[in-house]
Amino acid sequence: MATDSRQQQIIESALRRFSHFGINKTTMGEIAEDNGVSKANLYYYFPDKTALVIAVIKHLIADSYNTYRERAADRANVLTCLNAWIDVRREYFEKYYLLHVTLGTADNSLNMEQLTNIATYAQSMESKMTSSILEQGVQNGELVTMDIGATSNIYVNILKGLAMVYISCEMNKDLPELGTFTTISNQQKLATEIFVNGLRKQKKQ
Amino acid sequence: MATDSRQQQIIESALRRFSHFGINKTTMGEIAEDNGVSKANLYYYFPDKTALVIAVIKHLIADSYNTYRERAADRANVLTCLNAWIDVRREYFEKYYLLHVTLGTADNSLNMEQLTNIATYAQSMESKMTSSILEQGVQNGELVTMDIGATSNIYVNILKGLAMVYISCEMNKDLPELGTFTTISNQQKLATEIFVNGLRKQKKQ
DNA sequence: TTTTTGACTTTAATTAAAAATTGGTCAAAT
DNA sequence: ATTTGACCAATTTTTAATTAAAGTCAAAAA
């Protein structure tokens, strides 16, 4: 369908603006201009700005999971899988940093309830993906049996929390220092190593 | 010294106001009134508002460490020590929540650089305390040898990060739900259990 | 000398109104 | 089915006026 591909086109152009200038500083008029159509026409494809933002985020979620799957097809153990996932996370976080942070400081023109919902959805997707990695580890005999839902949930929150800790330090500046994203993923990997170790089944000697 | 005890008195009254109304909504005039002295006299004891805030925070840090030491004198293993520390953290965080959060959204009348410094100091103190717990665990033979500085550092950031994750959800409301603090400390304890497990030395069989 | 204060200055927060921008709508055109 | 110019309502941004609070100081009180 032509409508569908035009929607994709709009989503990608919106993503560019959101990640360059943030959500609030990107107007529907500008996005329309970028696509060579009128603002009114934009509203033929998306009912409101919130819907467009959500479409962009869902696009990003799907994209990052595809990237991970391509890359992690042959990873054998839990630690390498999680490290690969952390790398993907870092790349997307660094690339679309402004989109991420401006989600938290959104305009009143955006529907905060819907934005909260999509954030919850994103986290549940991440927890689901972590679950499947842990699940595999349990079935391999690599990890002890555990409450996989609760464990992956807390693991995701640990990653998220570590990112927040280091990002909050750079909040005064307009954009964070280049090294911050690397610092975050390094800390996340260090934490992951200890965390996975704590779930590891002891080899019988 | 009378001056010293008067300072202590001012610190305690300021702490009450800071934790009830936040730092920004507490004026030096009000603190002076609470102590039955003029505002000008307050500036005889503290050079500026920032200095008073810092004195209050240092008081709180010392107080919480004393509480921990009293309580954890006979704790034997690493996990119970860290859990005891998490409980102390929770009590102080809940009690002085508004002081904590208003530190991050401070007025321009406060010296942000000095405030950042005291926050860094607080974290280094916490890291030091965690270090001594881990150190003891290593010497007990309970934990493997490790880079204690780096490990305690990341552990403190995990605790801090988990708190940030759950607090950020309640940021829209004026004050967070009652259960949030319990949720945070429960998650912190769960993470701690896995974390300590990951540092545990394997018993020879 | 140490402590205290009233009166003062300066800086920052708050408020209110005006102007500009932007999200969103709709009938009509293609 | 798609597109648009013209339009409205709501929001943000700007500006200036007002208020309030941080911080100072010479002089008094202890």
Image: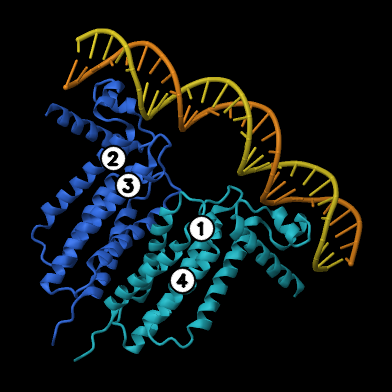
Chain colours: A blue, B cyan, C yellow, D orange
Nearer to us of marks 1 and 2 is 2
Residue ID for mark 4: B126
Q: B175 or A181, which lies in front?
A: B175
In the depicted structure, whether residue A137 falls above or below residue A88 = below
Disc marking residue A54: 2
Judge if badges 4 and 2 mark residues of a common chain: no
Nearer to us of marks 1 and 3 is 3
Residues under labels 3 and 2: Cα distance?
Answer: 10 Å
Outermost bottom residue: B205
Q: Position of residue B177 (x, y in %)?
A: 47, 58
Judge if badges 1 and 2 mark residues of a common chain: no
Residue ID for mark 1: B116
Secondary structure at badge 2 equals helix
Secondary structure at badge 3 equals helix
Secondary structure at badge 4 equals helix
Structural crowding at the residue carrying mark 2, measured as other residues with C-alpha within 10 Å and reported as few (<14), some (14–19) or many (≥20): some
> Is B33 situated left or right of A187 in this image?
right
Q: Chain letter of disc 2?
A: A
Nearer to us of marks 4 and 1 is 4
Amino acid on which the number 2 mark rests in the picture: Ile
Q: A198 or B61, which lies in front?
A: A198
